[in-house]
Amino acid sequence: MRTLLGSSADISGRGALLATIVCAVRVVAASGAAYGGRVTPATAPSARAWRDALVAVLAGFAVMAVTAAAGLALAGAGELPGGAFPHVVAAVVLMAAGGSVEVTGGAGFLAGADASLSLLPLSVSLAGALTTGWLFLRPLHNRAVAGARELLARAAPLVVLWLVALTGVALLSRQNFAVSTGDSILGDIGEILDASPTVGFEAAIPATLGFGLLWILGLLLVALLVSRRAPLPAGLVRFHAAVRPAAFAVVALLLAYVAIGIGVGLVVAATGGHADRTLAVILLGLPNLVWPALTLGFGGAWEGKAEGPFGLPVPQVLDEVLRATGRDSAPDLSTIDVASLAERDARAWWLVVLAVVLLLGAGALAAARSPAHVRPWQHALHLAVALALGTLVVCLLARIQAQFGLSLLGIGDSGELGGEVLLRPLLWRTVGLAFLAGAVTGFLGALLTRRRSEPARRAPAEPAPPVPPTP
C-alpha cells in the first residue's frame, strides 16, 4: 500500500500541490467572471477590447449619420438631384468627426472657382461624441485605478477603427452639382459655349486622418477627465480632486446651454413658423450658436461678416450685425458682443443673466463634487483653468469660414454667384474673460456650498437609543 500511494510526506506534498492548483483555477475563474465572460486564452482581453471598440465606433458613426440625415432632410437636401443625398450625409458626418472637405467648382477651361469651407456641424459632433465616449468608458467603470498599459490597450483599438471608419466615410464624400445662373449673362455665355458652371466637394483624406486623429484622442481624454468613475493610472490619481470636478462642471455647463437651446428652438419651431428649418438647425448646428452665446454672456466677443445672397440659419439680429460691414464708414468685419446685439434687440442682455446664473451653478457643482479639504481659492483656480480651456476649445470648434466665387471668362467673380461668411472669436479677450469668470464663480460657488454644508456639520448628533439590559 505504501508503495502504491507513496510515503505520508509525499501524500502531504501532493495535497498541497493539489490545493494550490485548485486555488489558481478559482482565481482565474473569478477573474473571467469579473470580465463578464468565459475564460479564454491570453488574447481574450485584447479580443474583448477590439470588440468593445468596434461597438463604440459603429454606434458613434451610426448616431452621427442618423442625426445628419434627419437634419439635412429637414433642410431640403433630400431633393438634391443625382442621388446626392447619401454623399452629402457622408460629408457632414466626415466634418463632424474631424474630417476635412474641399469645395471645388468651375466650368472647364472657360471658368474658375474660388471656394473654401471650414466649419463643424457641432450637433452631429456632440451626438457622436456622447455615444462613443459613453461606450468607451462603460467597460472601465468597475474600479478606480488602472494601469497605463490597460488604458492604452483599450484606447488603441478604438482609435484605429475610428480612422478606418473615417476613411470609408471619406471615400463616399464626393459629389458635383450644376449651378443655375438664371437669366444672367453668365447663363447665356455658358449655354453658347457649353460651359455651365458646377460646384462640388470631395474629402481631403490626409487632412481628414490627421484632424480625425486629434478629434478622437481629444474625445477620449475629455471622457477620462470628466467621468468620476473612470479609472486612472496610479500616478495620476492624486490629480483627481483638482481636475475632474472642474472638468465635469464645464462639460455640464456646455450641455446645459445645449438643452436650453433645444427648448428655445422647439418653442420657436412651434410658434414662429418654418419649423423644418428650425429643427434642421437644432440637429445640425445648435452648439455653433449656443456655445458662442455663452462666451458673449461673460463678456467675450466675436467678429465676422456675411456677404452675398445666401441666407444664414442664425437669429435675425446676428444676421443683421454680420451684414453691417463695408457700408459707408463701417469696418470690414463687424464686432459681435452683447452691446452690438442689444443695439438691435434689447433682449440680448438676457445672455448676461443666463451666463451668470449657469456659471454660478457650475461653480457650486464643482465645489460639491470636490473633497472637503479643497479651499475656496483652489476651487476658483480649478474652475478658471477649466473654463478657459473649455472656451478655447469652443472658439476653435465654432468658428466658421465659407467662401464661394465663380467666374466665367472673368465675369461674375463677385456678383450673384459669390458670397462669403466669416465668424471667428476675439481669442485673447474671450479666453481671458473666461478665466476671470471661472475664478469668480468658482470662488462664490465654493462659499455657497460651504455655507450650506456648515449647519449640517454643526448640528448635534442625536443620542443613541439606550441598550436594554441583557437578562
Image (cartoon, rainbow, N blue to C red):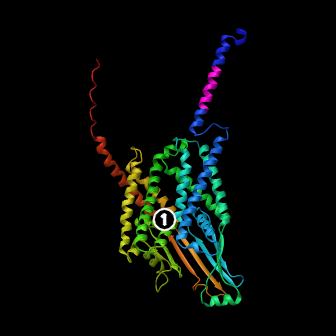
Which quadrant is the N terminus positioned in? top right
Q: Residue 95 falls in which quadrant of the image? A: bottom right
Q: Residue at 59% of width from left, 35% of height from top?
A: 31
The answer to whether 85 is drawn above or below residue 378 in the figure is below
243 and 312: which is toward the camera: 312
Q: Is the stretch drawn in magenta largely helix, strand or loop?
A: helix
The magenta stretch spans which residues? 16-28
Q: Residue at 47% of width from left, 53% of height from top?
A: 247
The answer to whether 411 is drawn above or below residue 400 in the figure is below
Looking at the rendered structure, the number of numbered marks drawn on it comes to 1
316 and 392: which is toward the camera: 316
The outermost residue toward the top is 1
418 and 210: which is toward the camera: 418
Q: Position of residue 277 (x, y in %)?
A: 49, 72
Label 1 sits on a secondary structure element that is helix
350 and 338: which is toward the camera: 350
Q: Residue at 55% of width from left, 73% of height from top?
A: 76
Q: Position of residue 35 (x, y in %)?
A: 58, 40
Q: Is residue 25 magenta?
A: yes
Which quadrant is the C terminus positioned in? top left
Q: Is residue 446 magenta?
A: no
Q: Is residue 236 left or right of residue 253?
A: right
Q: Residue 81 falls in which quadrant of the image? A: bottom right
